[in-house]
Image: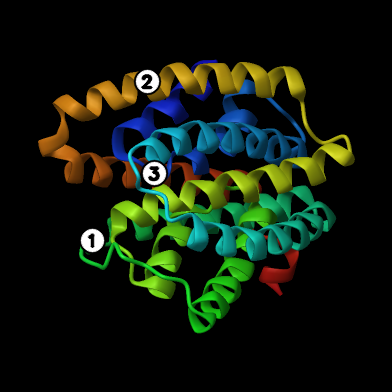
Amino acid sequence: MLSGGAVGFSLGLIGGGGSILAVPLLLYVVGITDPHVAIGTSALAVAANAFTNLLGHWRAGNVKWACAGTFALAGIVGAGIGSTLGKLVDGQQLLFLFALAMIAVGVAMLRPRAAAGSGDVRVTLRMAVRLAAIGLVVGALAGFFGIGGGFLIVPGLMLATGMPILNAIGSSLFSVGSFALTTATNYALSGLVDWVIALLFITGGVAGGYLGMRAAVSLAANRRSLTFVFAGIIFAVAAYMLVRTGIPPWLSI
């Protein structure tokens, strides 16, 4: 519950990136020994967290459902393919690649995002093709690593549609939840989800998310600084995972 609370708090505080810490927390703090079980369990927690946050953005009118649905449908296919491939990869090698993905998340968090864009988005055939193509690729990556993929989905939606970042964040949560749920289902069918730990992790995440949102209101002026601090934490955890897993044989040749 404390680990889930930490993830939920970070998501509520800075609005992203926290889900990438779920797997290392489940492995090195909670004590799950199988990397595949950690990924499957974290994916279920990420899905629950994303769909919970989606409701708030839906009520606020931030979700562009036509764009979100097109992106998510293609991404679900990608997540199914990616999660199937992830189960076939050796656990330690998968953790090595996961640590590299964490570094990519940290770098993406440090990049400034433009808030401009047109909120009046109408899906055309050309836009639908772009949404589906980007969604398929992002979904495959999210499924392979067992993450929500919001750090890729938000810029992907903005690139494909030109919508403002607020709409992209709200719309992305539908894809984050869909991709994570697809991954969790795939892993669950192979018996790679610990349901009790997932429930406790989700419960902690809900409480942590509420506290994070409360803290975000009072610390709004320092939001950028908090993002830098959190990116530093992600880099540190990624470095720890790289040391623990070592260099894969295929990379040392």
In the rendered structure, find residue 16 and report the number of the disc placed on it. Answer: 3
Q: How is the image coloured?
A: rainbow
Q: Where in the figure is residue 137, as x and y percent of width and height?
A: 61, 70
The residue type indicated by label 1 comes to Pro
Q: How many marks on residues?
A: 3
In the rendered structure, find residue 210 and report the number of the disc placed on it. Answer: 2
How far apart, in angstroms, are the residues tagged by discs 2 and 3? 14 Å
Q: Secondary structure at mark 1?
A: loop
The residue type indicated by label 2 comes to Tyr
> Residue 136 falls in which quadrant of the image?
bottom right
- Number of other residues with Cα within 10 Å of mark 2, as a class: few under 14, some 14 to 19, many 20 or more: some
Q: Nearer the viewer, residue 135 or 37?
A: 135
Q: Nearer the viewer, residue 163 or 220?
A: 163
Q: Residue at x 47, y 42 (%)?
A: 237
* Image quarter (top left, top right, bottom left or bottom right) of the C terminus: bottom right
- Number of other residues with Cα within 10 Å of mark 1, as a class: few under 14, some 14 to 19, many 20 or more: few
According to the picture, the residue beneath numbered tag 1 turns out to be 112
Name the front one of labels 2 and 3.
2
Q: Are marks 2 and 3 in contact (CB under 8 Å)?
A: no
Q: Residue at x 34, y 54 (%)?
A: 167
- Relative height, residue 86 to residue 136 (above, below): above
Q: Where in the figure is residue 202, as x and y percent of width and height?
A: 58, 23
